[in-house]
Amino acid sequence: MVPLSYYLLLSGFLFGCGVVGFLIKRNIITIFMSIELMLNGVNLSFVAFAAHWHALAGQVFVFFVMVVAAAEAAVGLAIIIAVYRTRETLNVDQMNLLKL
Amino acid sequence: MNPMLNLWLIPVLPLAGAAINGFLGRKSSRPAVTTVALFFSGAAFAMALWVAMQFSSLSLPYHEYVAHWIRSGSFSVDFAFYLDQLSLVMLLVVTGVGFLIHIYAVGYMWDDPSYYRFFSYLNLFMFFMLTLVLANNYLMMFIGWEGVGLASYLLIGFWFTKDSAASAGKKAFIVNRIGDFGFLIALFLLIKHFGSLNFEQVFQQISPISPETAGAGLLTAIGILLMVGACGKSAQIPLYIWLPDAMEGPTPVSALIHAATMVTAGVYMVARSHVIFERAPTALTVVAIIGTLTAFFAATIGIAQTDIKKVLAYSTVSQLGYMFMACGVGAFSAGIFHLMTHAFFKGLLFLAAGSVIHAVGGEQDMRKMGGLRSYVPWTFLTMGIATLAIAGVPPLAGFWSKDEILWKAYQVSKVYWGIGVITAFITSFYMFRLLYMTFFGDYHGAQVDAHGHGSHGGDAHGHGEPHESPAVMLAPLLILAALSLVGGLVGWGNHFEHFLAPVLGAGEAVEGASRGTELLLMGVSVAVALLGWWLAYVLYYARPELPQKIADALGGFYQTVVHKYYVDEIYAALFVKPLIDGSTRILWQEVDRKIIDAAVNDAGEGARHVSDEARHMQSGNLRSYAGWIAAGSAVVIAFMIWMGVR
């Protein structure tokens, strides 16, 4: 039996990778993937805790997260395509219309 | 058991007329507006007559409860009506004279573009005045009191595009507000000390109180404050200044509101509160002194006026002074008697003056009239009757009531009587002066126009020959003239006083010995009336060059009288100017602009400065937002861990 802490460390590592990728990457696709990475890190801790405590709710929660992530991916990719068509770049530093 | 009188209908009928004409009148034709206005005011008059016919079979006072209004602990005020001999007299005067003036106004206002508005206001006035008269408590009386003030304001400023009319309306309203202030405080005192505003409940509690002969107490305070209110509404010194200016309104308004009915509300209120005044001799003395002084001073101002309506306005102020003199000497029924006869002959005088003004095409300056006798014979006849009546020539109405007042005043103090008689002389003089200047001698109007303005001779509506007014205006004149002729006879043998005795208390029986004195005094009043007539005849008919010489001889004093003793100027310097200066310099420039405005502006400026700094956080850069989110989450997590450790 693998101890719970291993799963949690892996989960924290995945989430940390996501955060760092989100903050340092300029390409919007990479940023998007970092978000997915964070979500999956969280999912891992969910299932780990669910298995550890024999609580089904955590597993069900993961399904919800996956569904939302899928929907978000669809919308997000559509936005990215729209942005690319109008601005012809995927560099977030150049997407600064909101700036004063 | 009393029959149902449905008294509430009497005020509500004119209100319905006001509403119909006010909301629908703009689109209606003139005959339709006329029908509505006359029907509803006439219906009120018919109901008043019907009530009067049933009067002998009623057990008085008659109460009619309509609805709750205010319930607060043990204090309650209802919408309820109250009818006794005093309110019946007022009811008949208001509806009767009011209806006649409505008829007159049809002719007078026919060409006015705002015909419907005029009648809507006039009906509204009737509603409030009848509420005032029929109320069974002070608060409802106060509604009527304020309401007639509103109607008065609207009608004085009826021709509001004329600057002087608009400011006259405002002046009337503001000056009245000063009086209302006193009235309101008197009401607060009544609530505090007697827990009620209902006439009967208040008077029941007051009647056992013995008169405050030594010094002044609560009742004196209430009485004087009520008198302050009456001073405003009834144009007494020191608040009479609004009434002469109120002549800017159309003439039927001057007749109805500023001569016959509204301005007598103060007299009615004082008579209604006689229980209070009888127990406050100091307050009564105040009333008598104010009344006597007003009667005298207003009469002297009336001598030197040249505007026909201004003469009548000062005459009204003076006659109201007589009424207060009567109340002040405890002769409330004499005051109400004079109120009634005054409503007849002063209403008639104003209507006749309106007919004269109508005849000469809007001119109001008596110096530009003269010789109108042959042009407007009916107007001359009725105005002559009214002049005789107000001058106190027997057996016309004014003689009986004025004589009654002077006789009662004589019994209290010969000073009041003396001033009253001098005033009667002045009254007779200025009224016959008006009559001679207007109707006798040569007509000056057309010539002045022809010479002075050349081709502008026909600018106003229908100049040319003065013409008699239409029948719709003459009929009310004739009816009022008949009333001025015989209206005083109800006072014959003290009938009127006996009629009002259940409300106002019986006057002391006249001792046999003083009968002779009464006749003597009567002779004196008649003599001064005739003397005034004779003097006016000499100065303004027989030797018309004399008045100018006398005026020159008097010099400064004459100028003072012409300028109404500079009272308006004194008030302007004492009250109005400091108020305006204080408002401008201190309240506006200092308080409003430097404190209130500055506070608001600085708050706005401050918010902008803070925001100017804070907006740099909004870089618009996505990655910096993400950084803020990450940093914020880190802080939250760190905080939670720290909390968990503790």
Image (tube, coloured by chain):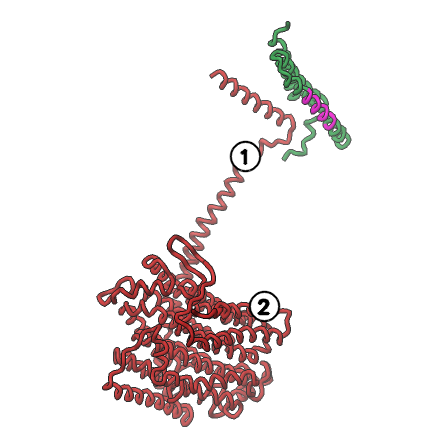
Q: Determine the residue located farthest toward the bottom in the rendered image.
A: B542
Q: Residue at x 45, y 76 (%)?
A: B52
Q: Nearer the viewer, residue A60 or B233?
A: A60
Q: Nearer the viewer, residue A49 or B561?
A: A49
Q: Tell me which secondary structure the magenta stretch mostly adopts.
A: helix
In the rendered image of this protein, does residue B583 appear above or below residue B549? above
In the rendered image of this protein, does residue B176 appear above or below residue B565? above
Amino acid carrying label 2: it is Ile
Q: Residue at x 44, y 88 (%)?
A: B385
Q: Nearer the viewer, residue B97 or A31?
A: B97
Q: Position of residue B547 (x, y in %)?
A: 39, 88
Identify the mark at residue B354; answer none if there is no mark. Answer: none
Q: Quick check: is A74 in the magenta stretch?
A: yes
Give the chain letter at badge 2. Answer: B
In the rendered image of this protein, does residue B230 appear above or below residue B532? above
Q: Position of residue B565 (x, y in %)?
A: 36, 75
Q: Residues within 10 Å of mark 2 (few under 14, many from 20)?
A: some
Per the image, the residue denoted by label 2 is B20
Q: Position of residue B165 (x, y in %)?
A: 50, 71
Element on which disc 2 rests: helix
Which chain appears green? A
Q: Determine the residue located farthest toward the front in the rendered image.
A: B1
Q: Residue at x 45, y 52 (%)?
A: B592
User: Which color was chain B given?
Assistant: red
* Distance in Å between CA atoms under marks 2 and 1: 62 Å
Give the chain letter at badge 1. Answer: B
Q: Quadrant of the N terminus of chain B?
A: bottom left
**Magenta residue span:** A63-75
Task: Looking at the image, tell me whether mark 2 or mark 1 is earlier in sequence order.
Answer: 2
Per the image, the residue denoted by label 1 is B613
